[in-house]
Image (spheres, grey):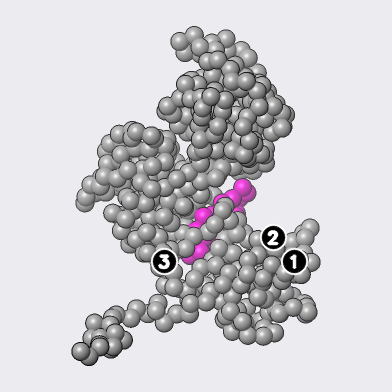
Amino acid sequence: MNATNPLTHPLLRAWPVAPRDTLPLALWTSAEIAAATGGTASHDFQASGVEMDSRDVKAGDLFVALKGEAMDGHKFIPQASEKGAVSVIVDRPVDYPHVLVEDTTQALHDLAHFARERSHATRIGITGSVGKTGVKEAIFACLDRASRGAAHRSVRSYNNHVGVPLSLARMPARAKFGVFEMGMNHEGEIAPLAAHVRPHVALITTIAPAHIENLGSLEAIADEKARIFTGLLPGGTAIIPADSEWVERLIGHAKGCGAEIVTFGRSADADVRLLDAIPARGGGALVTADLGDRRICYHVAEPGEHWIVNSLGVMAAVRAAGGDLASAGLALAEMGGLKGRGARHRIAVPGGEALLIDESYNANPASMRATLKALAASDATRRLAVLGSMKELGDFSDPFHRQLAEPLIEAGVTHAILVGEEMRALAEELGKLSAGPLGKVTTFAHCGTPAEAIAALGQFGLAPGDAVLVKGSNSVGLGRLVSHLTEHAPAGTAAGG
């Protein structure tokens, strides 16, 4: 019996070859880097990653020695080399494998633009006052599932003037989709980021008073966020929250940029419109949405009403990018919470377990209300909240903190631990309120530091069936409290409830 050579099988010979199949597998070669930056490589090499922080370098990475006002990355070249960097981008000769350029920051930008142009990936840009990172991760999960691993996205919250070009420089030539987050805290920051990415699709999650200290008004925040549309490629799609009071302002900006406009939300005239949302057991919801020419039904694993609306924006972006809606539905059903942005942990307490909701990475008035509402929907014997100060609110700080009293009480919070000087306004407001709905009193403690908050929570005590929300601006440092609860059994005796 004659064996058939599998390599000469007619079906294999006829296997279609796509243009992307001819692109290199390595992320970067020394020749590509030299061509992109105009630099000179000291030797031939291939790099599998790009990094700017020597502490995060992995074997095979290209280390970019960036210079800032207070730090010069050239000082950390030995550490990067020890951790396995194959080469470094430098602006002076060094005794390590390197690519010599005139300016390392410009070289990173050059790499970003080269990576953008060599790839045929459909690029999605995301900004907004609340929910950028979660929506970015959701869109990535949807597109990555549909493309079988050919999607790329910015990691962590790499959304600023360094993080965005770094994320672009990390995009493989063979990527089919690229998802990029863009953030700001001052006027004039979004447009340059959009110019780096040049997205095919640009999505704004919502407009809220985050960074209002620097922008001055919600109108100014809306205008700044809308500048993401200035980077859209011709014929690109602007995805806009229909329920925002600034929807017409955002639409006006999008029209001025010649964008195709898609709105999403609960509004009756939204292009991607919520028809129904049924709470699912264990959190999340079964969502039915109208896309105009069809209706879709899918499960959102993430709990909270804000995620129901977020999912509509995700579906709008996936469709605009040419992704598969069925795969997107499966991805949304499987998503788990992100560290510091909704991750849920079961932690050991005396006699059983309690639920810990980790929202410790960021906070503003809108996201505080949304997560307190999600806490209210949690199945719990008692609901506790550890709330850290909301930063960059300027003259609006005291009123915005005081206004958290109502949603906190409405959420049925038994005990609140308030952390940071700005939270003093909320403590004073709670002190004026003798009782919440049904005569239930919300007790509270005001602390100055995360260490004091850990002690206060231990003194209060956690009991089986408790749900604990931890949320605050990242600079408050409540991640320490989350780490303490997930790594150690809490101190103190469980209180009765």
User: Mark 1: which amino acid?
Assistant: Gln
Q: Residue at x 28, y 54 (%)?
A: 326
User: Mark 2: which amino acid?
Assistant: Arg
Q: Which residue is mark 1?
A: 79
Q: Is residue 435 above or below residue 126?
A: above
Of labels 3 and 2, earlier in sequence is 2
* Secondary structure at numbered mark 2: helix
Residue sitting nearer the eye, 225 or 427: 427
Q: Is residue 149 highlighted in magenta? A: no
Tag on residue 55?
A: 2
The crowd level at tag 1 (other Cα within 10 Å; few <14, some 14-19, many 20+) is: some
Q: Residue at x 65, y 61 (%)?
A: 56
* Real-space Cα separation, disc 3 to disc 2, in angstroms: 27 Å
Residue 491 image point, x, y percent: 66, 27
The crowd level at tag 2 (other Cα within 10 Å; few <14, some 14-19, many 20+) is: few
The number of numbered badges drawn on the structure is 3
Q: Is residue 331 above or below residue 300?
A: below
- Which residues are the magenta region? 180-200
Q: Is residue 194 highlighted in magenta? A: yes
Q: Is residue 251 visible?
A: no
Q: Residue at x 54, y 54 (%)?
A: 182
Residue 194 image point, x, y percent: 52, 60
Q: Which residue is mark 3?
A: 150
Badge 2 vs badge 1, beta-carbon distance below 8 Å: yes
Residue 179 image point, x, y percent: 46, 59
User: Mark 3: which amino acid?
Assistant: Ala
* Real-space Cα separation, disc 1 to disc 3, in angstroms: 32 Å
Residue sitting nearer the eye, 362 or 342: 342
Badge 3 vs badge 2, beta-carbon distance below 8 Å: no
* Real-space Cα separation, disc 2 to disc 1, in angstroms: 8 Å
Q: Is residue 211 visible?
A: yes
